[in-house]
Amino acid sequence: MAVPDPRRAVPRTDVVLADQRLQPAITQLGTARVKAAVRSAQEAVRRQELPAGLVVDSVLAALSSAPGSMRQVINATGIVLHTNLGRAPLSSAAIQAIGEVAAYVDVEYDLSTGRRAKRGRGTLAALRSAVPAAEDVLVVNNGAAALLLAVTTLARGRSAAGRVGDSAGSAGSAQDEVIMSRGELVEIGDGFRLPELISAAGARIVEVGTTNRTNRADYQRALSESTGCIVKVHPSNFRIEGFTAEVTVAELAALSGDVPVVVDIGSGLLVPDVLFPAEPDVTSTLIAGADLVLCSGDKLLGGPQSGLLFGRAELIERLRRDPLARALRVDKLTLAALEASVSGPPTPTARYLRADPDTLRMRATALAGGLPSELGALVVEVSGAVGGGGAPGVELPGWALSLPAGYAERLRAGRPPVVGRVEAGRCLLDLRCVDGEQDALVLQAILDAGGFA
Ligand SMILES: *Cc1c(COP(=O)(O)O)cnc(C)c1O
């Protein structure tokens, strides 16, 4: 007997679109979006994953979830700040705050006087009270924007400063040089190189020292009338060991004179953290003498994508008044999420970084116990990672469920997609970044992927 061609059973698009049950969705969401959902349901029927009779139900279910092309995934990679998965997941407090301010909101308005007020003042106050060592703070789009703004403002040439017609014979007065150690000319990831960003800002980098060693005299020799600032960068994602030397922030502050010392610490710890003894933090860096400290908001801080600048009030004010600041400013959603992340309950990032290995082992064992034995699931010791270009030497001890490698792809195709990692021919699911309530979802996803449903 011939096997029936499953494509025969696929209902036609116009027939599905004419179904009464879809009319409210077409009116509300538009034909294009409903049609796209119909297409993917038809595909599922072709792949024999959906009975033809359930096409409309499947379309309705797909449309009832949030619109948009990005899909929520379960991060079972064990990498807490996974850049490809959007870095830091937000806390419930931050998500709630975003929902609250999505409407009209007094972001730049004083309700008592009915006049304009300072934009995002509550968020700035929260950051200032988290870092009392900072005289002032500014929030921009991301860490890269923070560096761009700092360099553009502090190391601009005379013509760029807008003194039109005053360029003759004044080449020596342009302060467009940025002094940087050769050991800190780093690439952050995906081709993003800090020196290229600094050059794009119109500044000239004066490289000092060597890859492994830079000393005070190197900086001293490079300082001149043309120096706009000294930039020190924390090499977030690699370590140089052995015969090395670098100049500390305190030493730079002592030798720099009037020249601002700008320190890009990358990760965004506001205060020291015993879990990451080698990571610099904003407070200690300011106390050591930095004039400006920059970091990302969505790395170890666990907030929304943003770039934070802390430091001397006079410098922050110059940055704030730079025309570029307007192009790099954050929206109200970011301000709200950042405030909740800084002053609210511990962020998911903080919780995942501190996940207790014994609890991870128990959860993985419970999952394994819920699976058919023929699947061959094991519970294995693994180490998770901070990720996101932070704390490169730090390993986070934990346990993972180990499945045959073929599960990785099938789990990614599931609903919700579960993203694990493949190591030594096995698919590892690390529950470090999975909230306990989601374990049942993960179990169901594995059963579905294995066809055990
Ligand atoms: C991550 C990082 C950046 C870039 O920050 P984004 O928020 O990703 O733009 C810049 N400098 C350092 C040292 C970093 O670690």
Image (tube, rainbow, N blue to C red):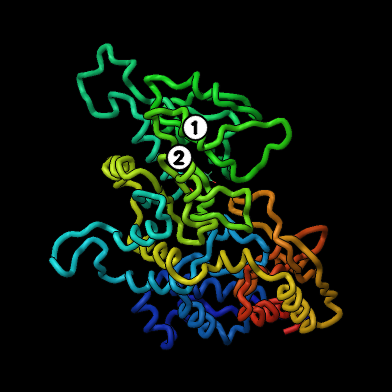
Residue that numbered label 1 is attached to: 252
Taking depth in this image into account, of 413 and 392 the one nearest to the observer is 392
Asked whether the viewer can see residue 5, the reply is: no
Q: Amino acid at mark 1?
A: Leu
Residue contact at pointers 1 and 2, CB within 8 angstroms: yes
**Residue 276: image x %, image y %?**
62, 54
Q: Within 8 Å of ligand 1, the CB of disc 1?
A: no
* Element on which disc 2 rests: loop
Residue that numbered label 2 is attached to: 289
**Residue 130: image x %, image y %?**
42, 59
Q: Is residue 201 above or below residue 413?
A: above
Label 1, label 2: how far apart the Cα atoms are: 8 Å
In the image, 352: left or right of 132? right
Question: Which quarter of the figure has residue 126?
Answer: bottom left
Residue closest to the far top: 169
Asked whether the viewer can see residue 150, the reply is: yes
Identity of the residue drawn at 74% across and 66% down = 398
Question: Which quarter of the figure has residue 248?
Answer: top right
Mark 1 neighbour class, 10 Å CA radius: few under 14, some 14 to 19, many 20 or more: many
Mark 2 neighbour class, 10 Å CA radius: few under 14, some 14 to 19, many 20 or more: many
Identity of the residue drawn at 49% across and 65% down = 69
**Residue 97: image x %, image y %?**
38, 71
Identity of the residue drawn at 67% across and 57% down = 385
The mark nearer the N terminus, 1 or 2, is 1
**Looking at the rendering, in which quadrant would you find the N terminus?**
bottom right
* Element on which disc 1 rests: helix
In the image, 240: left or right of 346? right
Taking depth in this image into account, of 128 and 333 the one nearest to the observer is 128
**Looking at the rendering, in which quadrant would you find the C terminus?**
bottom right
